[in-house]
Amino acid sequence: MPFRVALSGLNAAGQDLRITANNIANVNTTGFKRARAEFGDVFAVSAFGVANNAIGSGVALNRVSQQFTQGNVDFTQNSLDMAISGDGFFTLNDNGSTVYSRAGAFGVDREGFVVNAGGARLQVFPPVAGLPDRFDGGRLTDLQLATTDSAPSATTSAQIGLTLPANATVPTITPFSPTEPRSYNHSTSVTVFDSLGTSHVQTMYFVKTGTNQWNAHTYIDGAAVGGAQALTFDSQGVLTAPANGLITLPPHTPTSGTPPVANGAAPMVIALNLSATTQRGERFGVNSLTQDGYATGRLVGVSVSPEGVVAARYTNGQSTPLGQVVMTRFANPQGLQQLGDTSFSETTESGEAVRGEPGTSSFGVIQAGALEASNVDLTAELVNMITAQRNFQANAQMISTSDQIQQTIINIR
């Protein structure tokens, strides 16, 4: 009997060494979670239970338990690398099967899908059409990077904040002409865009006509758009007319080339907002000059927010959300089934998958451009290796001792 007890001890020590060896082997595996051997003693139980003087029958490995503690976050240069800081798993589509992982080393396949090294596709909540800041939490979809250009948007409004000098004099040269600098006081320009994304130069000329009175002339690519627009200021330099500082220019057909011809874009209708324009001081100043149009853009990169929002960035300064990373957690993560490649699958012991957005409830946040390292403590594993080795030697010594005792009995005459 001592042979079998000691043999179970040898097996247990060997299994402990195998687990320790696996932990050490994966010390540099991204997202790896160390395992721990959990043993239980063995008793021979009869139909009436265990007697008070029963002696144990050895040891058995009850479970290999994964330890889902947080690993260190190491920063990388890859924008698609993601690390989870907190609770939760990445949700992946592996050829139709849903798997889960803490390893966030992602790349792009030939079809533009974001995948891990095994080809499993990262799952996201898709954006809601027309609401770029909202995502459909009821649907999961594969994350695919946009390969097309960003569509242009025509300029519809321009915000113009100027300071017109109160001491300006009325020009002596009349009538106004953009080619005659002495016929106007000041000018400023902004680039605007038509519906095809072609840029045009919009220039505004300001002519003082009297006390607290100015005229604004608007030209696009050298062509006048509407007539003079009267601006009136009060004694404090605040714009009082037009109402609310709003001027809507008449439709302008965009042109290009020399001589200029219509380029096929829709007529441009631009509303000017001069509410931030004042008449004060002695110098002309441009405080703000913005417009809402932009040209066609090419994809230049991808960004991931701490909330898991993946957005494509374009050369025109626009950013288009592609989806929000799906986070999944379980009531008992130690009940997950290991699949290899640092992936897990749901089981009855793990409980049902609970999905949500990063940074909400008890879900962790996403760190872009970083990877979660293995949570293996190499020093602790080396100490455990020595302990398991001593256990193995002690059980081997027990077999040797039992053999000597049996040999002594056999030699009795």
Image: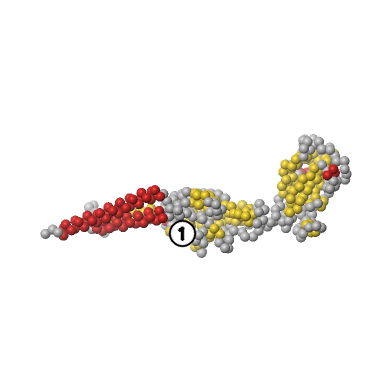
Query: Residue 221 at what x, y percent from top left?
Result: 79, 52
Residue shown at the point (51%, 59%) measured from the top left: 116
Which residue lies under the disc numbered 1? 341
Please give left or right for residue 246 compared with residue 403 in the image: right
Q: Quadrant of the C terminus?
A: bottom left
Residue shown at the point (41%, 55%) measured from the top left: 25
The residue at the far left in this view is 413
Please give left or right for residue 301 compared with residue 70 in the image: right
Query: Residue 13 at what x, y percent from top left?
Result: 32, 55
Query: Residue 87 at what x, y percent from top left?
Result: 48, 50
Q: From what the image shows, is residue 98 above or below residue 70?
A: below
Amino acid tagged 1 = Asp
Q: Quadrant of the N terminus?
A: bottom left
7 or 407, nearer to the observer: 407
Query: Residue 6 at what x, y percent from top left?
Result: 26, 56
Secondary structure of residue under mark 1:
loop
Q: Residues within 10 Å of mark 1 (few under 14, many from 20)?
A: some
Residue shown at the point (13%, 58%) measured from the top left: 412
The answer to whether residue 406 shows anywhere in this view is yes
Question: In this figure, what is the number of numbered marks?
Answer: 1
